[in-house]
């Protein structure tokens, strides 16, 4: 006799940290198998885009820190690039190199948190996470030397950076560059062939390349699907075109590939840092700017390859001291588009690590 069954809907979240912030998944199960999933957003909406339209261009820089607060330096960078494009501002060479150094340190820091949190979701409670925190602390020490902050930095400025690096920064950075490859090797030794990680991540949550492109995915999520697209090379900004680095890509587009790509990207960031330090010129660190910038009437879109993908700012100027329109292209919001497609057919435990492999920050999703 056939048993009468019916789908059941389960709300997962909002809670922290298992859903990486106040995020809810409305999941429909047939037994233990996921047959539908709806991402539910909006719990953290703070109206940053509207707030930014009532503040001056410079006053908006700290607001960008509060988006992806695990990658605040790169948020600053994307925004000031958009303003500089809108206003036609030239940035001194030393400032450009300092921006690259901060951005690549931020990428490593963000990926450390992404991989550590993902492994925590997989069930490797705390040990890998604490390994990742160990190196992240060294990066935060470097940021603290530069601007006195460890989370929200407000370091970038329209036309450059707020001030030059202190004398002790470069020696400490060189030590980090020398040591970091060995620590990444340590992560690989601990994780790359770990049978539990392989069993849980290999072949799970596959995002085919065509679907990744059609959903406008970017960053490690896109490159894990085999698409070799990185804005630092595809549409170079700052002085990235002067550095030699690779673009790691996956083959399958599964959870494991998304983990692997982030590990390899940290290695490439160390390569960029080494070159940027050696090429760092002397000179000014910020162009001379008016206290109240009034860009000419027009519009501009500035984007960068952030740790989580393409982070862009669309600005419209009406020649006043504040943007007439301020819109953020947040990579984690776009990357969540494919969550349902990656999750249907898998089970609840798989859904948690598939979601974790995307690497989101809710403050950027809901902003």
Image (cartoon, rainbow, N blue to C red):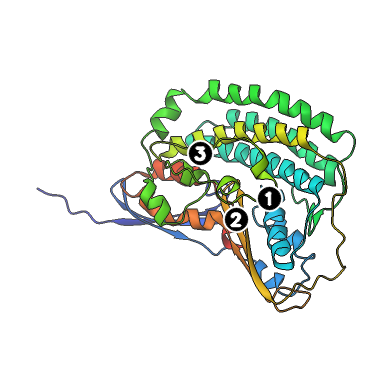
Label 1 environment density (alpha carbons within 10 Å; few <14, some 14–19, many ≥20): many
Which image quarter holds the C terminus? bottom right
| Res. 316 visible in picture | no
The number of discs equals 3
> Relative to 153, does residue 318 appear above or below in the rendering?
below
Who's the residue at 21% across and 54% down the image?
Answer: 5
Q: Position of residue 151 (x, y in %)?
A: 74, 47
Residue 311, numbered circle: 2
Q: Earlier in the sequence, mark 1 or mark 2?
A: 1
**Residue assigned mark 3:** 121
Q: CA distance from mark 1 to mark 2?
A: 9 Å
Q: Which residue is mark 1?
A: 74
- Is label 1 in a helix, a strand or a loop? helix
Q: Which comes sooner in the sequence, label 1 or label 3? A: 1
Q: Is residue 290 left or right of residue 238?
A: right
Percent x, y for residue 110? 63, 42
Residue farthest along the right direction in this orientation: 167
Residue nearest the viewer, comparing 320 with 50: 320
Q: Quadrant of residue 9?
A: bottom left
Q: Say if 168 sits above or below 233 in the image.
A: above
Mark 1 or mark 3: which is in front?
A: 1
The mark lying in front, picked from 2 and 3, is: 2
Q: Residues within 10 Å of mark 2 (few under 14, many from 20)?
A: many
Asked whether residue 15 is in view, the answer is yes
Percent across and percent down for residue 353 are 46, 41
Residue at the (9%, 48%) spot, across then down = 1
Q: CA distance from mark 2 to mark 3?
A: 25 Å
Query: Which residue is the extreme one toward the left?
Result: 1
């Amino acid at each position: 006799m056939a048993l009468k069954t019916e789908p059941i809907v389960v709300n997962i979240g909002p809670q922290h940290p298992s859903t990486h912030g106040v995020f809810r998944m409305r999941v429909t199960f047939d037994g233990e198998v996921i047959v539908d999933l709806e991402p539910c957003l909006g719990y953290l909406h703070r109206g940053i885009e509207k707030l930014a339209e009532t503040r001056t261009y410079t006053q908006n820089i700290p607001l960008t820190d509060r988006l992806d607060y695990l990658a605040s330096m790169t948020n600053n960078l994307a925004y000031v690039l958009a303003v500089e494009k809108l206003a036609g501002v030239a940035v001194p060479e030393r400032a450009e190199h300092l921006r690259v150094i901060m951005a690549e340190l931020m990428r490593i820091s963000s990926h450390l948190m992404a991989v550590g949190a993902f492994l925590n979701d997989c069930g490797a409670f705390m040990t890998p996470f604490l390994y990742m925190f160990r190196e992240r602390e060294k990066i935060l020490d470097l940021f603290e030397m530069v601007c006195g902050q460890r989370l929200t930095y407000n370091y970038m400025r329209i036309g450059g950076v707020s001030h030059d690096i202190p004398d002790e920064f470069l020696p400490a950075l060189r030590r980090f560059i020398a040591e970091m490859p060995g620590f990444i090797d340590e992560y690989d030794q601990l994780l790359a062939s770990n049978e539990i990680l392989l069993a849980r991540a290999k072949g799970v949550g596959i995002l085919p390349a065509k679907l990744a492109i059609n959903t406008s995915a970017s960053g490690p999520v896109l490159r894990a699907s085999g698409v070799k697209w990185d804005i630092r090379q595809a549409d170079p900004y700052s002085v990235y075109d002067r550095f030699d680095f690779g673009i790691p890509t996956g083959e399958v587009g599964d959870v494991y590939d998304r983990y692997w790509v982030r590990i390899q990207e940290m290695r490439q960031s160390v390569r960029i840092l080494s070159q940027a330090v050696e090429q760092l010129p002397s000179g000014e660190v910020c162009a001379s700017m008016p206290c109240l910038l009034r860009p000419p009437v027009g519009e501009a879109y500035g984007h960068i390859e952030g740790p989580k993908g393409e982070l862009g700012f669309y600005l419209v100027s009406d020649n006043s001291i504040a943007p007439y329109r301020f819109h953020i292209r947040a990579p984690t919001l776009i990357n969540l588009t494919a969550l349902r497609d990656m999750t249907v057919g898998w089970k609840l435990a798989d859904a948690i690590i598939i979601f974790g492999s995307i690497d989101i920050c809710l403050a950027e999703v809901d902003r």
